[in-house]
Amino acid sequence: MQKVTRIRSEEPYRKMWDTFVYFENEQTAVRYLRERYEALGFEDPQRSAYLATPKLIYGIKQAREYYRAAENCDIMTKPLLLYYGMMSLARVFIATRDPDYPTTTSVLKHGLSTRKLKKDAYQFTEDEIRVQKDGLFVLLHSLLGGSPFQERHRVFIKDLLSVLPELVSSYRQVYGLPSVCEIEEETDSEGSYWDLPRWILQSKGITREEFLNLMNQTLQAERPVFYLTESDPPGRLRLYHSVPITSHTLQIHDLTGKPFIRYPLEDGTYIPEISMHFMVMFVLGMLCRYETERWGEMILTFYSQDVYIINEFLNLSIRKFPNLIVNQLFGEQYIFYST
């Protein structure tokens, strides 16, 4: 189970960025990378650490400037700046796992693509992303432990937004039931269980038993861990477990640390949260950069219902994506809060 560190601050966002300063000192960065590479079994961790240190330090500095600029700019250009900031942070994370990155020019590509020509009745949430054979995203996703993609695998924006915990309310207002819900750990005379809203079954049109099978299969334990009892309270689903559950592949947390459970994609693909943010921002960045007229009409004329969820996602991602990278660098779940 990942350690949770809670840090109180009057300005949580600023405090989160201050945490990156730990890696911006050469001695600290070299020591951190050497220990990381030793744990990974590299042949000459000290040499690799010295070579990778500039990537770590300057990558963080560049990312900070992109995010700082995004904070102070209009929505017309915000997605592009955030995407570039994400790319810088992605390279920082990769450098802690692969000191030789980039080894070939192929890994310098985005690793993602989207439809070049948008339809007249374009809807952002109905757009699709194709995962390429190689590139920055492919390497990032692999190092995060995400499910492997088939070449030119298609993922729809709507499916990604539907499983982000902070967007549950706004997604439901515009598109219907999301594919993620909060879970609460409870205990009664039957044992310990996860308490969930029953609408999570309706969002995919499945039964209690089918949901139970999904949870057990995804856990990949030697024997079933979750089980059901005779009945549930009205509107609730009780998922009992025979052993303590410290983590689950489909578990995801919001910024306050609350646990949620989400569905995988239709084909069973598991996508880490960092990958999801990266994919959605890629499409927004491409719209912003190459479809300027359409982008302007979408966000300034407000003809599209997608504007609401786009704005919600941008506000979320600017705060959460760097936080997720911090978590990866320290191997802990960092929660920055003000009250």
Image (cartoon, helix red, strand yellow):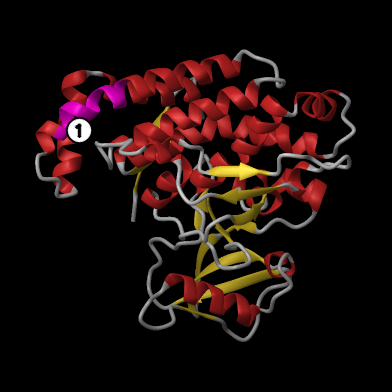
Q: Is residue 183 magenta?
A: no
Furthest-front residue in this view:
105
Q: Quadrant of residue 301?
A: top right
**Residue type (three-letter) at the residue carrying disc 1:** Tyr
Residue 312, relative to residue 273: is it above or below?
above
Q: How many neighbours does mark 1 have within 10 angstroms: few (below 14), some (14-19), or many (20 or more)?
A: some
Percent x, y of residue 84: 52, 26
Q: Quadrant of residue 318?
A: top right
Percent x, y of residue 106: 42, 40
Residue at x 39% of width, y 83% of height: 223
Residue 214 appears in the rendering: yes
Specify whether 91 is left or right of 264.
Answer: left
Percent x, y of residue 39: 16, 47
Residue at x 50% of width, y 80% of height: 190
Residue 129, relative to residue 26: is it above or below?
below
* Number of numbered tags placed on the structure image: 1
Q: Main secondary structure of the magenta part?
A: helix
Magenta highlight range: 48-57
> Residue at label 1?
32
Residue 238, relative to residue 196: is it above or below?
below
Percent x, y of residue 122: 83, 41
The quadrant of the image that shows the N terminus is bottom left
Q: Quadrant of residue 330?
A: top left
Q: Secondary structure at mark 1?
A: helix
Residue 334 appears in the rendering: no
Residue at x 60% of width, y 62% of height: 265
